[in-house]
Image (cartoon, rainbow, N blue to C red):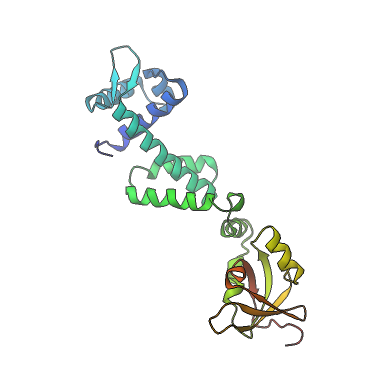
Amino acid sequence: MDVALTPSTEDYLKTIYEIAKEKKIVRIKDIKDKLKVKASSAINAVKILASKNLLVHERYGYIELTAQGIAVGRDLYERHLALYRFLNQVLQLDSDIARKDACAIEHYLHPKTVNRVVKLLDFISAAPNNEPQWIIKFKKFLYTDINECKYAKTLDKLEIGKTGTIKSINIKGGLKKRLMDMGITKGEKIKAVKKAPLGDPIEFSVKGYNVSLRKSEAKEIEIEERDDATIDGQ
């Protein structure tokens, strides 16, 4: 953002941009009502923004954003939206708190920080059903204090000779069915038996049978490892 704005004028420009998106025509009254400020404060902010060539406002007329005003306003709006989504969807704060806190912190974050938030949201939204396993576990922890990450690990990290309990299989389609046909199902105990010379595939014991899995397949299976875990008396 090339134009130097105070937190207050940023709020006014973002608000004007939002109103313009909804109504196309922006008046002082619209700004006053949306921000719950006095008309004199809104008029003063509009004058400042006009002096920076971000908008045009004829006396007693409509307010129109310039091309630069639209670009800066869009950046401010998208920054606010990203922070709101992070607070609401990731930290699980209710919408009112998320909205207020996004407004409070958005003016003071480095652009790189906001960009990282956006990338995190993009990363999360790419997961199946827009909700990766760690978000699901975090939600459960927030509301129940049950921390499933305390013991959870993926099957490819299970040490040879160690046993774990299968917690989830993060695979869909035919491959998941094939694994289940091999006895790899939720709640079943599984033991790491041996690895190939190059570490892939890995052989496991489950339900009295030995099965080999590629490391990439084992990585998609979450287990809970316990020190006292055993399988078939081993």
Residue 58: image x %, image y %?
Answer: 28, 14
User: Dividing the picture into quarters, in which one does residue 189 lie?
Assistant: bottom right
Q: What residue is drawn where x is 49% and y is 44%?
A: 85
- Number of residue marks: 0
Task: Report whether residue 186 is seen.
Answer: no
Drawn side of residue 183 relative to residue 108, left or right: right
Q: Position of residue 14 (x, y in %)?
A: 37, 32
Residue drawn at (31%, 27%) of the image: 67
Question: Does 54 sit above or below residue 112?
Answer: above
Which quadrant holds the C terminus? Answer: bottom right
Relative to 79, is 73 above or below? above
> Which image quadrant: the N terminus?
top left
Give the farthest residue toward the left: 51
Say which of 38 and 151 sits in front: 151
Residue 171 visible? The answer is yes
Q: Residue furthest top?
A: 60
Q: Give coordinates of residue 29: x percent, y percent.
A: 40, 18
Instruction: State left or right for residue 225 relative to residue 54.
Output: right
The picture places residue 108, in percent across and down from the top left corner, at 33, 46
The answer to whether residue 59 is above or below residue 16 is above
Residue 95 versus residue 65 in the image, above or below: below
In the rendered image, the residue lying farthest to the bottom is: 234
Query: On the picture, is 218 further left or further right than 38?
Result: right
Q: Nearer the viewer, residue 185 or 113?
A: 185
